[in-house]
Amino acid sequence: MNEYQRIFEDVKKASRKLIGLSDSKVNAALSDLADLAIAKSDFLLSENQKDLARMDSQNPMYDRLLLSAERIKNISSELIQVSNLLSPLHHVLEQKILENGLSLQKVSVPLGVIGIIYESRPNVTFDVFAIAIKSGNGLVLKGGSDADASNRAILSLIHEVLEKHEIPTQAFQLLPADRSATKALLEAVGFVDIIIPRGSQGLINFVRENAKVPVIETGAGIVHTYVDESADLEKAKAIILNSKTRRPSVCNSLDCLIIHETHLNNLNKLVAPLLEKEVEIFADELAFGALKTNPLVHKATEKHFGTEFLSLKLAIKTVANLDEALDHISHYSSQHSEAIVTENQDAMDRFLLEVDAAAVYINTSTAFTDGNQFGLGAEIGISTQKLHARGPMGLKELTSYKWIVRGNGQVRT
């Protein structure tokens, strides 16, 4: 048995004890971790600085990697929020008594051991631990080398709290940041029940194509907002700005603005706030012709559509009607988050009905695609597939179920 198999076996064995933990013990551990994150924020920031020093500050991933005192406070608040949520375990989802007298109950249980592969986002270490322990799941974490010092610092705090509450630390492990660990995790059949990648489309594709363990795809967001003919332009301007610039490096940020051709004469007003924020624009022929000359505005090529920019870049597509907008979204969407800005009820209804995405928005920003914003507490990722879970994956999405059958000597004939 190699080093990785020993880790996987330890996590699997220790995770069996998590389902028996009392809610009060789990909640106390989360509350203590929230306090400890604040108390040791200087330590966390110092370790995070080691990671930041190795990355170009102009890299779009820099913002994802960055921890700050304010972000640690927010992480602490989210840990408290998760502790206050109801446990998703031991719920009777269905029950019945058969004609032969057998009593059946369908009861919620943990998935088991979850493998998380993620890039440049140390806050994920806190997030996934919180909802994993709350849902009774063990964790095998595989962070990127960019954030290794930060991740190990965070895990040391987690283990400190677990030891205090006599919860097995072996149930939550961080693998080395090298590629051999990724390969081992993807092939950990019999030890890891499911793998969830969080990161770029390239990472997600690699995991899907190479994993022998079942995978839930999350994260990659090629996000569109369509400004319909009837749109309120003030609403549109605010929504576009927020969707694109609030956190441009995250998966719910806007990648492609689709505009009805009747708004070409309003396009300069719509994008003016973006240009003030130094957003680089790649516009199709009609939109480019309507925009004033600006060094940040370029002609779009095919590669700009269907691209998750994760930075201050935006594509613009002009359409003649809602059908063209729906076709464009259908062709390029990653089924993450899609939005329409419109005052037309028929357009709203068609958009909601026909757009195939985990989250579909009417007259609001796609920045809301987030487990915390949806009231789920922290999230383990945003699923862009349809099996098991879709959209922000909170506590309930990290459970499965088992059938409990009680009898009194019945045998099947």
Image: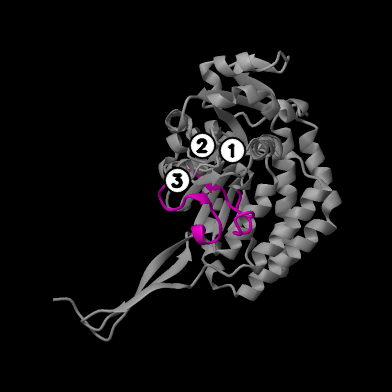
Find out whether the residues at labels 1 and 2 contact each other: C-beta distance under 8 Å: yes
Q: Which residue, given by chain and number where applicable, does mark 3 sit on?
A: 349
Q: In which quarter of the image is residue 272?
A: top right
- Closer to the chain start, of discs 1 and 2, is 1
> Residue at horizontal 78%, vertical 35%?
52
What's the magenta bit mostly, secondary-structure-wise?
Answer: loop
Residue 337: give x, y in percent of width and height.
Answer: 54, 41
Q: Quadrant of residue 177?
A: top right
> Given the current orientation, which residue lies at the most extreme left position?
413
The range drawn in magenta is: 370-398
> Residue at horizontal 44%, vertical 28%?
324
Secondary element at image label 3: helix
> Given the current orientation, which residue lies at the most extreme bottom position?
408
Residue 253: give x, y in percent of width and height.
Answer: 63, 37
Residue 139: give x, y in percent of width and height.
Answer: 57, 54
Secondary element at image label 2: helix
| Numbered label attached to residue 322 | none
Q: Which residue, given by chain and number where applicable, does mark 1 sit on?
A: 199
Q: What's the residue type where badge 1 is placed?
A: Gly
Q: Which residue, given by chain and number where applicable, does mark 2 sit on?
A: 204
